Image (cartoon, rainbow, N blue to C red):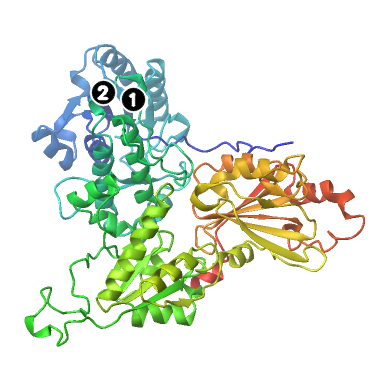
């Protein structure tokens, strides 16, 4: 039976409100009221402050904003209704005010804050009356220091800014502890912000421009039902193939294709590079044409630098630097494996190629910024535009770029994830470079086919559980279906590039009869499977389940984290808990369901996040 997550309660439904042309009503005129007013103004809301004593009793910031026309301060005594100095009478005055005022979106009560002058602090009874009035009118209310009266709470929020522009960034981050520790929420928010690149706000602005350009042709036609453009985050993975451009392409089809490009760039380009995109590059990205943009993890644009430039060299090449020979010196090409992702898994040869020899690095999109960050700043780095649906064209673009640079005498490092020869298309590149006069130097890397399972606590071979393993791909050349190996209890199946096609893979593995998609026996539905995402990286995630329930488990986590891989077989259980080395015993299959229940519990899957903390020190 499929297990779904059980709601634990106590959480907040975190939303972002658009308050344009709506009014936020703030009760109280202290410094916290000023902070709430600023947040509302920043969200394009009108702000009305109600306080006893009006503008004269308000804090300095509220006085200043009122004098500059940013908000309105109202005295309780000026509200319609019978006069009274009792705070318990405020609810009646508020009810009359709300009845005659349209467009109130939220009410914030700030004069209940602990530590305030006891003579000025609103009582619990008065706060309850005000909250009841708001709820009777379906207006959400927040009461400071009274979480039981709150319909919503404020997060500890940070809004990013672009220092190079007057345009505010659309990017905001908010943290909440649901009333259990506001000071801690602020600390967590600061920790998050400190770990993000300083240009992340500008990157959000550039992606916004890219989205607008992608949809430009259909914005005027949005009212036409058939012209709906799918947003780039509508799918849990950005790796669904991008449709090839048709000869006769409608504006809607073009917009859908371009929005997919936006998703790919958002997912894979380093933050600094996104922040530095020029208007021309925005157009080139959406068009899918043009030269490879120069990409560095620190955002430095090295496209126009001299082939042999060093730090501190002038941008313009000197005439005295012209070579004596008219023929450029022969260059070199390295095919290098970067391992599964963690920088400490680079081989010494790969590290040397990147840090000492490279003059141009042509990198696959999945190589993490932590590895690219090792490359000296004067070295040009370009990231492949090898996205689903464009793999062949981008592959040729990279090979041509490598040969062109080598012809200019440069040492080119073609940087691939994992090992270049394990589904890295190294063979195609070796033959291409050889045909153009270059014998590339192939530098092996730690393949994710072995490192990924290890980081997930899975041995691909284990006495008593797995006598052999086989590595395959989930997608063939030009996206064609591949024939998957059949079931053997004693064998572990490692599948790369299969997560995006998980439904088809599951059908092929479990179908009752041998098909064109599988050779050999069908896999039992209770066969263990592990889906490993971003193996070896801090945000690694593993979903452990069975073939029967893995699709539901993947759906339960929402957004996917490419790259992903699949491990299928009984060795997955061999090191879990106390371990199980009896999988290959003669009577073992009879106890498989009990094995699954003790492994997964009542749920149909188990999820782990992150890697062992010791790796952060390597």
Residue 512 pos. (x, y %): 77, 39
Vertical arrangement, residue 298 with respect to residue 604, above or below: below
Q: Secondary structure at mark 2?
A: helix
Residue contact at pointers 1 and 2, CB within 8 angstroms:
yes
Furthest toward the front, the residue is 435
Q: Give the x, y percent position of residue 167.
A: 17, 45
Relative image position of residue 75 (x, y in whole percent): 19, 25
Residue 492: in sight, yes or no? yes
Q: Residue at x 53, y 62 (%)?
A: 423
Q: Position of residue 607 (x, y in %)?
A: 62, 50
Q: To which residue does mark 1 refer?
A: 227
Q: Looking at the figure, which quarter contains the N terminus?
A: top right
Q: Nearer the viewer, residue 427 or 216?
A: 427
Task: Left or right? Give the position of 222 relative to 460.
Answer: left
At 29% across and 19% down in the image, what residue appears?
Answer: 223
Q: Is residue 111 visible?
A: no
Query: Disc 1 versus disc 2: distance between alpha carbons?
Result: 7 Å
Tell me which numbered mark, 1 or 2, is placed earlier along the sequence.
Answer: 2
Residue that badge 2 annotates: 221
Q: Is residue 111 above or below residue 521?
A: above
| Quarter location, residue 510 | top right
SS class of the residue under badge 1? Answer: helix
Pick whichever, 65 or 40, lies toward us. Answer: 40
Local crowd at mark 1 within 10 Å, few (<14), some, or many (≥20)?
some
């Amino acid at each position: 039976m499929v297990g779904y997550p059980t709601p634990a309660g106590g959480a907040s439904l975190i939303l972002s409100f658009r308050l344009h042309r709506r009014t936020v009503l703030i009760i109280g005129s202290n410094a916290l009221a000023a902070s709430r007013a600023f947040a509302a103004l920043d969200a394009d809301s009108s702000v009305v402050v109600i306080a006893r004593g009006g503008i004269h009793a308000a804090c300095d910031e509220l006085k200043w904003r009122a004098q500059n026309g940013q908000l309105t301060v109202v005295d309780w005594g000026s509200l319609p209704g019978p006069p009274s100095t009792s705070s318990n009478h405020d609810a009646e005055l508020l009810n009359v005010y709300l009845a005659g005022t349209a467009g109130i979106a939220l009410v914030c009560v700030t004069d209940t804050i602990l530590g305030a002058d006891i003579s000025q602090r609103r009582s619990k009874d008065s706060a309850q009356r005000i909250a009841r009035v708001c709820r009777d009118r379906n207006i959400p209310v927040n009461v400071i220091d009274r979480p039981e009266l709150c319909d919503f709470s404020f997060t500890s929020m940070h809004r990013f800014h672009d220092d190079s522009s007057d345009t505010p960034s659309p990017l905001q981050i908010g943290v909440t502890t649901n009333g259990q520790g506001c000071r801690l929420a602020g600390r967590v928010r600061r920790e998050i912000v400190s770990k993000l690149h300083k240009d992340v706000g500008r990157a959000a602005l550039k992606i916004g421009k890219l989205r607008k350009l992608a949809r430009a042709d259909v914005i005027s036609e949005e009212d036409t039902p058939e012209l709906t453009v799918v947003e780039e985050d509508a799918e849990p993975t950005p790796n669904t193939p991008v449709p090839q451009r048709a000869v006769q392409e409608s504006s809607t089809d073009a917009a859908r294709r371009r929005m997919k490009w936006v998703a790919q760039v958002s997912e894979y380009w380093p933050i600094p590079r996104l922040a530095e995109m020029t208007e021309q590059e925005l157009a080139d990205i959406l068009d899918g044409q043009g030269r490879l943009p120069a990409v560095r993890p620190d955002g430095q644009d090295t496209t126009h630098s001299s082939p042999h430039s060093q730090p501190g060299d002038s941008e313009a090449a000197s005439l005295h630097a012209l070579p004596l020979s008219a023929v450029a010196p022969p260059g070199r090409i390295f095919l290098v494996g970067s391992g599964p992702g963690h920088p400490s898994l680079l081989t010494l040869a790969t590290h040397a190629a990147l840090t000492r020899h490279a003059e141009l690095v042509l990198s696959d999109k999945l190589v993490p910024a932590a590895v690219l960050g090792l490359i000296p700043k004067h070295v040009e780095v370009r990231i492949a535009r090898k996205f689903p649906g464009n793999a062949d064209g981008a592959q040729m673009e990279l090979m041509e770029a490598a040969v062109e640079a080598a012809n200019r005498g440069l040492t080119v490092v073609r940087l691939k994830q994992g090992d270049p020869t394990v589904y890295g298309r190294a063979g195609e590149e070796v033959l291409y470079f050889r045909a153009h006069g270059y014998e590339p130097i192939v530098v092996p890397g730690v393949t994710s086919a072995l490192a990924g399972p290890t980081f997930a606590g899975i041995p691909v071979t284990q006495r008593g559980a797995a006598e052999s393993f086989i590595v395959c791909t989930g997608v063939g050349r030009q996206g064609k279906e591949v024939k998957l190996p059949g079931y053997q209890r004693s064998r572990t199946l490692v599948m790369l590039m299969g997560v995006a096609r998980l439904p088809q893979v599951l059908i092929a593995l479990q179908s009752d009869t041998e098909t064109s998609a599988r050779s050999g026996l069908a896999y039992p539905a209770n066969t263990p499977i592990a889906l490993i995402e971003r193996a070896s990286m801090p945000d690694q995630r593993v979903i452990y389940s069975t073939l029967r329930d893995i699709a539901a488990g993947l759906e339960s986590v929402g957004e996917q984290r490419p790259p992903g891989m699949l491990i299928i077989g009984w060795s997955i259980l061999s090191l879990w808990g106390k371990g199980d080395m009896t999988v290959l015993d003669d009577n073992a299959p009879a106890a498989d369901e009990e094995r699954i229940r003790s492994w997964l519990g009542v749920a149909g899957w188990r999820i782990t996040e992150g890697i062992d903390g010791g790796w952060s020190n390597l």
